Image (spheres, rainbow, N blue to C red):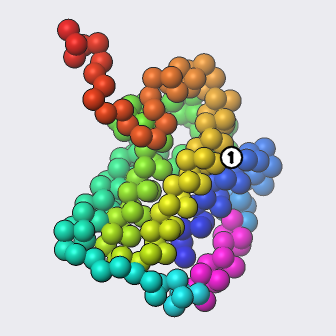
Amino acid sequence: MMWPIIPLALIQLHLFPSFWRKIGLWTYLVVLLEWLPVAYIIRSLQDVLLQHEFYVTTPIIVIGVFLVVGGIVLHGWTAKLLGIKATVGYTELKPDDNVNNDNLVMSGPFSVVRHPSYGAHSLIIVGTFLITGVIAVGITALIDFLIAYFVTMELEERELIERFGDQYMEYQMKVPKFFPKIGVHNDRDRA
């Protein structure tokens, strides 16, 4: 039931930032009010949504637990680097209130991929799917990834280019969007 609030908030926030900036902190209330009927519908259909599942073996559950824990740790790490205000979208709503608005975070997981928070989110949902075996959770994981990758990240990147300009475009050229580069060595490793 909680999942839809994330894409609902982020897509709107990045699609119409000037509108939401005028509303300010009331944005959170608006998103909550939009989410409530969706949550009610999901809750009403829970028996139908949760009835289809596959048998989950212990190794699959263990993998799921590792994914969930890894996702939580990664999410915590990105939240620590970005700060709580950026994590909850406050920096997009009130960019002038943010003292660190001029600092593009490119360290830690942000040196591996540009959007590690979405990776963390995906790990948590996929892990939950593997733990529960509920098909609806697997479908949610797929839908979440598609929305995040093709919609939310694109809108966020547009906003980050506006905010950081050339610095962000150089960062885009060096660091992959979502999937880390595997087996790529930097110049120091080749020497």
Whether 69 is among the magenta residues is no
The structure residue drawn at horizontal position 40% and vertical position 53%, both measured from the top left corner, is: 120
Question: In the rendering, at what x and y percent does residue 94 appear?
Answer: 67, 44
- Is 182 displayed left or right of 57 in the figure? right
Instruction: Look at the image and tell me whether residue 29 can be seen.
Output: no
Label 1 packing within 10 angstroms: few (<14), some (14-19), many (20+) = many
Where is residue 113, by image quadrant?
top left
Which residue is painted at 43% across and 44% down in the image? 116
Q: Does residue 122 appear left or right of residue 9 in this picture? A: left
Q: Mark 1 points at which residue?
A: 14
Which residue occupies the foreground of this view, 176 or 94? 176
Q: What stretch is highlighted in magenta?
A: 31-44
Left or right: where does residue 137 sit relative to residue 183? right
Locate residue 111, reporting x and y percent: 38, 31
Q: Where, quadrant-wise, is the C terminus in this rendering?
A: top left
Q: Which image quadrant: the N terminus? A: bottom right
Residue at (51, 91) in percent of width and height? 47
Residue 62: x percent and y percent? 21, 67
Nearer to the camera, 56 or 86? 56
Secondary structure state at the residue bearing disc 1 = helix
State which quadrant residue 176 falls in.
top left
Amino acid marked by disc 1: His
Quick check: is 40 in the magenta stretch? Answer: yes
Q: Closer to the camera, 1 or 164?
A: 1
167 or 189, which is in the foreground? Answer: 189
Give the quarter of the image for residue 159: top right
